[in-house]
Amino acid sequence: MTAPFIDKEQPFVAHLIELRNRLIKAGFAILVVTLMLGIYPGPAALYELMAAPLVAHLPRGSTLIATSVISPFMVPMKVLLVAAFMLALPVVLYQAWAFVAPGLYAHEKKLVLPLVVSSTVLFLMGVAFCYFFVFGRVFAFIQSFAPASITATPDIEAYLDFVLSMFLAFGMAFEVPVVVMVLARMDIFSIAKLKEFRGYFVVLAFIIAAIVTPPDVISQLALAIPMCLLYEIGIWAAQVFIRHTQAPDKATNT
């Protein structure tokens, strides 16, 4: 009576072991990158790099401050971990793909790997766009409104929270093409419906930008406009993607 139960339990245990191994490999990759970045350039240098866009627009003589005793230690360490995770993200997503790949058909494997690669690249592109283009313009805009009687001395923890929220917002916003491709490929929305939704998406993009960005026009436009452009790219990419990831029988019929 117990044999069938044991037979069913063994594949489940094997999947758990496989999941554990994949998580260990992903964690090991993050650990290796963390140690490498900890040695060079080091947590302090990484924080200086992250703070550079703000420091460049502070009044002369102004600096960032730490209002907590442990902030000078904890904030650079958090920056180190975030940087390590971003650099190890391709390995993390590959381990996720390798875990689900054995249970997929050949045409489904063609679907997953491009999504893993494109989602990684697009997320990092969003972070880079935020750091190199948006931050400088936002901080310059904000400082231009500061009265002469106010001395700007931002807190490093508050700045870290702001940077991480902006990185996440722009990184996720740049995933729009991937979301569009998945919706089209899973037949949730047809290409025609996605094209009809253009006008609504423009409104939605500006609403999202108004919610997740600071209350200034520059950052809102910097998020909303790329989202609209990426939506169009997603519609085009979805048509190509669907054509190359169809099941063999569907491809033959079409």
Image (cartoon, rainbow, N blue to C red):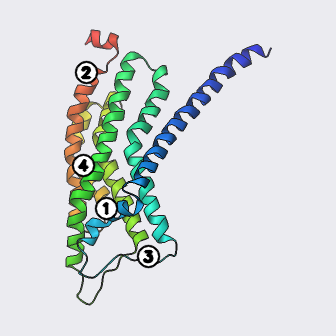
Q: Quadrant of residue 214?
A: bottom left
The residue under label 1 is: 49
Say which residue label 3 marks. 66
Residue 243 image offset from top left, x and y in percent = 25, 21
Foreground tag (1 vs 2): 1
Q: Amino acid at mark 2?
A: Arg
120 lies left or right of 254: right
Mark 4 residue crowding within 10 angstroms, few (<14) / some (14–19) / many (20+):
many
Residue under the image location 34 percent in, 59 percent down? 166
Q: Given the image, on which type of amino acid does mark 3 rest? A: Ala
Nearest the viewer among 95 and 180 is 95
Specify the quadrant of the image occupied by residue 21: top right
Q: Is residue 135 depicted above or below 93 in this figure? A: below
Q: Nearer the viewer, mark 4 or mark 1?
A: 1
Q: Earlier in the sequence, mark 4 or mark 2?
A: 4
Q: Is the residue marked by circle 2 packed among few (<14), some (14-19), or many (20+) residues within 10 Å?
A: some
Using the image as rendered, state which of residue 211 and residue 124 is in the foreground. Answer: 124
The residue located at (23%, 42%) in the rendering is 231
Give the quadrant of the C terminus.
Answer: top left
Q: Identify the residue at the far bottom of this view.
A: 149
- Measure the C-alpha gap from mark 1 to mark 2: 43 Å
> Residue at horizontal 28%, vertical 69%?
54
- Residue at the disc numbered 2: 243
